[in-house]
Image (cartoon, rainbow, N blue to C red):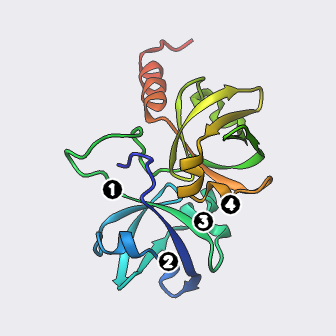
């Protein structure tokens, strides 16, 4: 479990196929000093397990499902990635509960500055539209954000300068894919209603 508060922006060293499958290696001096092999780390919001650790370098194994569903497949050398360690019991809860289970990758429709803040509009796939709620929580590339506008086929969030400076959100270009995880509470409500709704 995570909070959506990014601790560090790491830098991709490589992503490649091998007999062991697909692996991702990145450098993250701050985070590497606080994690060990076997620990969970959210990489662009996707929960991954540290499979190797050497100095400032962290290595992760990637499943085919992860590559199919997230924007990690598009990473290249020097790509910036948002990083967060798993939530520790008793630690302050500053964002919202983020599982690290990406629902979908969606296209950025627009990213514009308005005054001191920034508005990011993201495509809303029809299969996930029922999870989106006005003023509801959403994680984009692992960042805890609030849905400020809910449109017919998209939604928008507002981003403060601090978030833009300390995450990779400022590198998002129109047409690029971002990882989206909708609020877990919406999924539990859907499940409960499905279990208690009589069949037609």
Taking 27 as reference, is 120 left or right? right
Quarter of the figure with the C terminus? top right
First in sequence: mark 1 vs mark 2: 2
The residue where tag 1 is placed is 86
The residue where tag 3 is placed is 72
The residue where tag 4 is placed is 171
Residue at image position (60%, 52%) is 164
First in sequence: mark 3 vs mark 2: 2
Percent across and percent down for residue 190 are 49, 25
First in sequence: mark 1 vs mark 3: 3
Secondary structure beneath dot 4 equals helix
Report crowding for label 2: few under 14, some 14 to 19, many 20 or more residues within 10 A (C-alpha). Answer: many
- Cβ atoms at labels 3 and 2 below 8 Å apart: no
Secondary structure beneath dot 3 equals helix
- Cβ atoms at labels 1 and 4 below 8 Å apart: no
- Give the distance between the C-alpha atoms of the residues marked 3 and 2, in whole angstroms: 12 Å
Secondary structure beneath dot 2 equals strand
Q: Residue furthest front?
A: 115
Percent across and percent down for residue 52 are 36, 81
The residue where tag 2 is placed is 26
Percent across and percent down for residue 113 are 74, 43
């Amino acid at each position: 479990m995570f909070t959506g508060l990014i601790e560090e922006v790491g830098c991709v060293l490589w992503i490649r196929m091998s007999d062991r499958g697909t692996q991702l290696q990145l450098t993250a001096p701050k985070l590497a000093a606080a994690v060990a092999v076997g620990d969970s780390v959210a990489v662009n919001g996707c929960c991954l397990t540290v499979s190797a650790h050497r100095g400032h370098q962290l290595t992760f194994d990637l499943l085919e499902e992860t590559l199919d569903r997230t924007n990690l497949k598009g990473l290249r050398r020097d790509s910036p990635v948002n990083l967060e360690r798993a939530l520790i019991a008793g630690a302050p809860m500053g964002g919202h509960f983020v599982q690290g289970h990406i629902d979908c990758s969606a296209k950025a429709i627009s990213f514009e500055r308005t005054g001191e803040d920034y508005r990011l509009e993201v495509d809303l796939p029809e299969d996930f539209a029922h999870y989106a709620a006005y003023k509801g929580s959403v994680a984009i590339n692992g960042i805890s954000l609030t849905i400020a506008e809910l449109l017919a086929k998209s939604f928008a969030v507002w981003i403060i300068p601090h978030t833009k400076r300390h995450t990779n959100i400022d590198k998002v270009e129109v047409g690029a894919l971002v990882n989206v995880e909708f609020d877990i509470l919406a999924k539990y409500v859907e499940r409960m209603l499905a279990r208690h709704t009589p069949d037609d």
